Image (tube, rainbow, N blue to C red):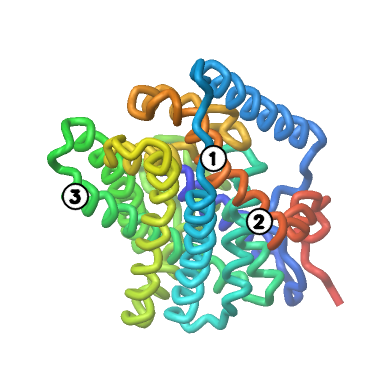
Amino acid sequence: MTPRAVRFFRSTSYVLRSTSTSTFPVVRLSPFPPHVSPKRWLAVLLSFGATIGISLYLVVSSWPAGGAATLPVGAHLLAFGAVLLEAGTRGVKLLLSARALRIPLRLGTALRTCLGGDFGAAITPARSGSEPARFFILAQAGVGAADVLLVLFTELFLEMLSLAIVAAVLGALFRGSGPMVGSLIGLIGGYAAVVLGAGAFAWALARRSASGPPPGWARGVGFNGARWRGVQRALRQIRASVGGLRRASPSLMGGALLFSVAHVLLRLTILPVIVLSLAPDVPLSPLVLWPLVFLYGGAVAPAPGGGGVVEIAFRATLHDVIPDVAFASALIWWRFYTFYLYILLGALAAGGTVLRALRDDGAESTTAAA
């Protein structure tokens, strides 16, 4: 199962564990673990320090003797506009997904949810804070726990479906650009196919094994007792989520899928805008395809912020593609517009809410009794 799917089902397990012991109506729920220690924050600071240090080293070591090119103001405006449009398309996608499921949601809440998830992802290992942060923001906005999980499940499904569509479109668009293109498209399409296949397998399993004792194969791999009951809680949620999808409005769900595809494509415009404004003769295909791998593959990096993994991969794959005069500016500004700016926007939109959740001492994970 892929990192984002793991994060979704981890947040699901927190919610189900919180609600399963409820005797009285739930007042507040937190899907976060009960305590975030100072060591966790130290790890975040060290990881960001390593990321910045590696970036500086790569920039200095790649700095040409005649000086690096300066990114034009027009390119900054285009990149910033693409970021705002990308965040907006994700917000509309979430809004349409909720309305397709007949779940009331405001556009402002949808935008805060997306940006708050970016902030939570950036400051947690392997982006593990993304789905719990989004859950928390939606729950704080008054959306019921079951509806939140249904919306997030739908959003995850649309994300993987749109990624498969984008991979197919890019494969057709760049089919004559060499064997590297086929390999990258295969990797990206395979990622989406694995997620969708894992979801289909989980749904089939949910129809047969969401209750009762564990089957023989599950006992054979160590799923006994409490472990299997935890799996069954997630399976029942999958079954409910798929049932909700089947009752969704097709037209609104189609609109959500279009906005999902648009948000992926907008994220891929940043590097071409930056590099082609500095070096117009650079081929387009690696500037589009490699960032797709970095942005989605970077989620497997265990350290908060990637710990420099994305920067090293950028240097290893694109140093021979981007001229020396443009490489330093490309690395700095691409990382700013695809990572650091989202941290800033997420902090402004919902940083306080996410940080309050991360500081939760466990009291909000319990239910309130009259």
Can you tell which mark lies on residue 346?
A: 2
Q: Circle 3 — which element? A: helix
* Disc 3 and disc 1 in contact, CB within 8 angstroms: no
Which residue does the image show at 53% across and 55% down from the upper left? Answer: 77
- Residue 225 lies, with reference to residue 113, above or below; the image says above
Crowd around label 2: few <14 · some 14–19 · many ≥20 (10 Å): many
Separation (CA) of disc 2 from disc 1: 18 Å
Which residue does the image show at 46% across and 63% down from the upper left? Answer: 153
Q: Circle 1 — which element? A: helix
Which residue carries the number 3 mark? 173
Can you tell which mark lies on residue 333?
A: 1
Residue type marked 2: Gly
Report x, y in % for residue 220.
39, 36
Report x, y in % for residue 106.
59, 79
Separation (CA) of disc 3 from disc 2: 33 Å
Q: Quadrant of the N terminus?
A: top left
Task: Please state which of the two labelled residues, at mark 3 or mark 1, is closer to the viewer.
Answer: 1
Residue 355 visible, this angle: yes
Residue type marked 1: Trp
**Nearer the observer, 59 or 295:** 59
Report x, y in % for residue 146.
56, 71
Dot placed on the residue nearer the N-terminal end, 3 or 2: 3
Residue type marked 3: Leu
